[in-house]
Image (cartoon, grey):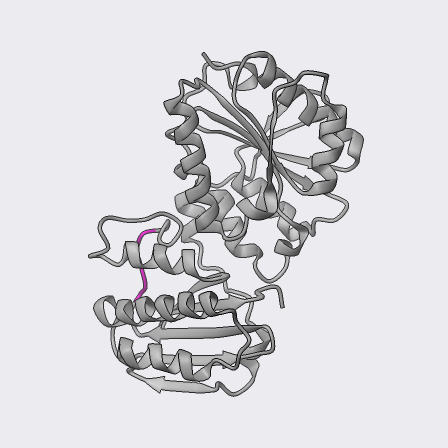
Amino acid sequence: MRTGAAAGYLGYYHESVCYASDEDLLAVAVPFLAGGSEAGEPTVVSMGGRNADLIRSALPAGAEVTFLSGDSLYARPAAAIRSYRNLLAGYVADGATQIRIIGELSPEMFGATWDSWARYESAINHAYDEFPLWSMCAYDTRTTPEPVLADVLRTHPRTAMPDGRHVPNATYVDPVTYLSDQRRPVPDPLEHGEPLVDLADPTASRARQAVRDGHRGVLPDQDLEDLVLAVSEAVANAHRHGRAPRRMRLWTGTDRMVVSVTDAGAGPKDPFAGLLPAGDGTDGGLGLWIIHQMCSHVTMDRRADGFTIRLTAGNPYH
């Protein structure tokens, strides 16, 4: 049986917490977590060190709350979805009838990579809806940019307030609609310069070799191998599902490698492509999901003249 604000609710009860002080955060988080502990529900905090310590010190003695490292869980959007789905499935298999989680993203994600995390916040409304999950996503209004806060309200159906209310967000957008919106990715500064590699109609094998040749020691060996695999998948998808002309470009900086693969097709039709696996890979859905697992940052840009997927390995927070 579900408890609290999610009592009687089926599926994923997804809330934002937009707080302006430590007191406001605790006013929401402590009753939420203590209530889960009292009800015997799996109750989890996935936050950075400062806020995790703040909440831990405010919880009543004996509260059964699990603290996870938010930094490790939120490394990449697709990987975060995979990790959370595994966590939730484990709790349900153990008999949980409701799971409570409060988490937060690192402020460094609010810059060049924010759109991928906004897509994550939207997609999980669908990705977690098979589980009896009640989660809160915390955003500090003192440090979160206004455009990010606007996206938070568009991707969360409701907001938990310090006074105990749970308020529907008037600007919430269904995830299929939100993910289908054609928003322009933020360019990587490296793309303003001449590419180190520029290939017309490359084969997957030629693309793999180009990545190896373009490496200048900026990536650990495993990150390089992951990028090689991801680029191979991207080029194969461009041949399998896209249209000529096809083009691959590569830039290498001091802390990252950036690769774009462009074709004249329309790109994937599935709005959840990349964030969730689709089928067995024969339609490209699994390949895109693998790409999102392998790279530090992935963007997909659809324009009238074609589709571009950009892969970043290394530091994506330029």
Question: In the figure, 305 relative to 7: above or below?
Answer: below
Q: Quadrant of residue 302?
A: bottom left
Q: Residue furthest front?
A: 221
Q: Can you see residue 285?
A: yes
Quadrant of the frame with the C terminus: bottom right
Q: Residue at x 26, y 70 (%)?
A: 236
10 relative position to 205: left or right: right
Q: Can you see residue 137?
A: no
Please tell me whether the stretch drawn in magenta is mainly helix, strand or loop.
loop
Q: Residue at x 57, y 35 (%)?
A: 170
- The image shows residue 10 at horizontal and vertical percentages of 41, 21
125 relative position to 262: left or right: right
- The image shows residue 136 at horizontal and vertical percentages of 59, 32
Q: Residue at x 64, y 39 (%)?
A: 47
Foreground pick, 218 / 299:
218
139 relative position to 233: left or right: right
Question: In the figure, 255 relative to 136: above or below?
Answer: below
- The image shows residue 231 at horizontal and vertical percentages of 36, 70
Q: Quadrant of residue 23?
A: top right
Q: Residue at x 70, y 49 (%)?
A: 144
- The image shows residue 286 at horizontal and vertical percentages of 29, 54
Foreground pick, 166 / 188:
188
The total number of labels drawn is 0
Foreground pick, 16 / 30:
30
Quadrant of the frame with the N terminus: top left
Q: Quadrant of residue 250?
A: bottom left
Residue 33 lies in magenta, yes or no? Answer: no
256 relative position to 144: left or right: left
Q: Which residues are magenta?
A: 266-270
